[in-house]
Amino acid sequence: TAVAWTTPLAKDTGMKVRLVAEEKLASMLGWVIRGETLCCSWSGSASDMLEGNDIYATRDLGPQPIAYMYPSSKTDVGFCTRGDSPIKTPYDIKPGTKIIYYTFMPKTVYNALLAWGNVSPEDVEWIASSSISGAASMIIAGSADIVFAYPTTPANYDIEACPQGMGWIELNAEADPEGAARFLEVMPSQTFGVMSSGVPSCHGKWGMVTVNGYMVRQDTDTELIYHLVKWLAENYDRYKDGSPDTAGMTVDNLMYLAEHSFKPLHDG
């Protein structure tokens, strides 16, 4: 996604852009907070960061003055299983269910899922994973039952391609508003909808649908942010087909962030 828009940006402006790959959300945000990078496509929980929960309970990653620069994607996300799993809704999660959690993100989203299904976090078996590909391998092998997943993530296509296929836990907020309300008590910043991107198995299934954004420090030069946002808005047609996510980099989604997220837009 970043390559899709930074390549024409560099050509137009002469800017030299360095892209750094990292899947650990807290590490990416830490680089921005410390001024080591301009921005990061961060989709972590702002409430966890602002409250200093779990991996954010450090001086560098606690409450910090960050802001949105521009949307990075409109994303489907949910909880996947192996296709032959009996777990189809949050209520199918029983004591002893094996849930993979990532060591680089808090368990908040998992606790919200368990709240929907009226299951105590103490009753499930937590399995740690430090990588997305490792988590996918555990789902394929049947050594774990559930993992938080983006349908567009390359490693999750491996689950889709395994003999048993891939399944998704339905988060149908319209059919079960009371369950969704319990989820939102734990993680209030989420919205639910029908997924339509990435692996075919998720299409038509209810998950979380959200707009993610590029985060910058609030004290980043206002003129720089203004001109970057202006270029992104005016050149959308040049990069919109560059990845599954670039189609979501629209001014409309920028306004969505302004209206629905408590993280502020940068002054630029």
Image (spheres, rainbow, N blue to C red):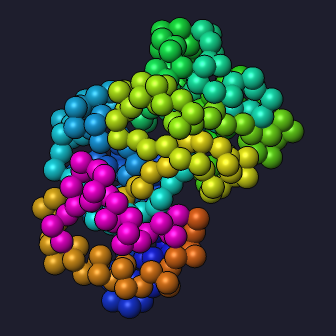
Q: Camera-side residue: 159 or 74?
A: 74
Q: Camera-side residue: 224 or 173?
A: 173
Q: Is residue 124 visible?
A: yes
- Magenta range: 245-268
- Judge whether 24 appears above or below 223 on screen: above
Q: Residue at x 29, y 81 (%)?
A: 230
Q: Residue at x 54, y 29 (%)?
A: 176
Q: Camera-side residue: 109 or 36?
A: 109
Residue 193 relative to residue 50: left or right: right
Question: Is 64 within the magenta?
Answer: no
Q: Residue at x 16, y 50 (%)?
A: 65
Q: Camera-side residue: 249 or 24?
A: 249
Q: Is residue 140 visible?
A: no
- Picture coordinates of residue 198, whole percent (x, y): 65, 55
Which image quarter: residue 229? bottom left
Residue 183 relative to residue 47: left or right: right
- Judge whether 27 appears above or below 130 on screen: below
Report the number of discs: 0
- Picture coordinates of residue 217, whole percent (x, y): 20, 58
Residue 141 relative to residue 258: left or right: right
Which image quarter: residue 40? bottom left
- Picture coordinates of residue 103, whole percent (x, y): 46, 31
- Picture coordinates of residue 1, whole percent (x, y): 50, 67
Q: Residue at x 53, y 47 (%)?
A: 193
